[in-house]
Amino acid sequence: TQSTRPQRLLAAVHKKATRGNPRSVVKAIDEFCNQNEWAMNVGNEKGSEILDSVVSETNPGCVLELGTYCGYSTVRIASLLPPHAQLITLEFNPDNAAVARQVIAWAGVAEKVRLVEGESGEWIPKMKEQFGVKTFDLVFLDHWKNRYLLDTKLMEECGLLKKGSVLLADNVVCPGAPDYLEYIRNSPQYKSQFFKSHLEYTKAEDGLEKSVFLG
Ligand SMILES: Cc1ncnc2c1ncn2[C@@H]1O[C@H](/C=C/CNC(=O)c2cc(-c3ccc(F)cc3)cc(O)c2O)C[C@H]1O
Ligand SMILES: [Mg+2]
């Protein structure tokens, strides 16, 4: 039977990356996407210039990622976390989750990552009771773009954000998340900053929006 793109991406990781070396996993996926097949990973330009630097400067103890996909940004983030820090990542497509688990394991970051197979709307309200989360220091939004705003409001309602919590949203230009941007840039509860970049593996314009919750 035909393989899927995530399965072919995983095969490239097994073939090209060194087990236990997260940087080599990131490199193998970027090479696969540059040379073989485009895939919707945050990519190396946005990843190294924006995601990695926001993670490093935030030095988060507790991170939430919405939209694991194949685990590319999961591995980037996990490889930068301080010891004992935890990353919870939500993915509702079981085939994506299965690939992501193997990418995360191959990178050797599985002990820092809890991949939850399920829908953000269902699991955000369960974060405290199920995983003992108090608040998130950093949230990386990279799932369906029409869910960014809904899930941000849900995290506010569930008391999962505290003064200083950082929201980092991918693709606010392409494909775009207009309702999210309108809300977050006009809300007195957030201080937002746009980081201009390019759509992964292309020359098209894109960027990330970093928003600090003011409490
Ligand atoms: C609500 C919810 N809960 C849990 N997992 C969820 C979820 N919504 C999506 N997911 C999961 O996240 C992943 C979805 C990510 C959505 N990302 C995208 O649609 C996306 C699309 C593009 C793009 C840009 C230009 C083009 F011409 C074509 C595509 C680029 C990107 O970086 C993207 O993240 C996979 C899905 O199963
Ligand atoms: Mg994205």
Image (cartoon, grey):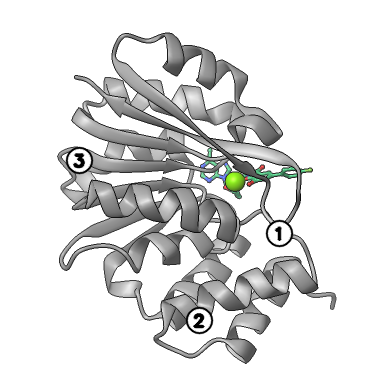
Point 42% across, 27% down: residue: 193
Q: CA distance from mark 1 to mark 3?
A: 33 Å
Q: Position of residue 110 (x, y in %)?
A: 34, 73
Quickly name the residue at label 1. Answer: 39
Q: Mark 1 or mark 3, which has the lower sequence index?
A: 1
In the rendered view, would you say 137 is above or below 202? Answer: above
**Camera-nearest residue between 194 and 84:** 194
- Screen quadrant of the N terminus: bottom right
Q: Amino acid at mark 1?
A: Ala
Q: Is residue 42 visible?
A: no
Q: Nearer the viewer, mark 1 or mark 2?
A: 2
Q: Position of residue 195 (x, y in %)?
A: 50, 36
Q: Is residue 76 visible?
A: yes
Q: Nearer the viewer, mark 3 or mark 2?
A: 2
Quickly name the residue at label 3. Answer: 128
Query: Of the numbered discs in the image, which one, if any, rests on residue 24?
Result: 2
Q: Mark 1 or mark 2, which has the lower sequence index?
A: 2
**Camera-nearest residue between 153 and 98:** 153
Q: Mark 3 or mark 2, which has the lower sequence index?
A: 2
Q: CA distance from mark 1 to mark 2?
A: 18 Å
Q: Amino acid at mark 2?
A: Ser
Label 2: element kind: helix
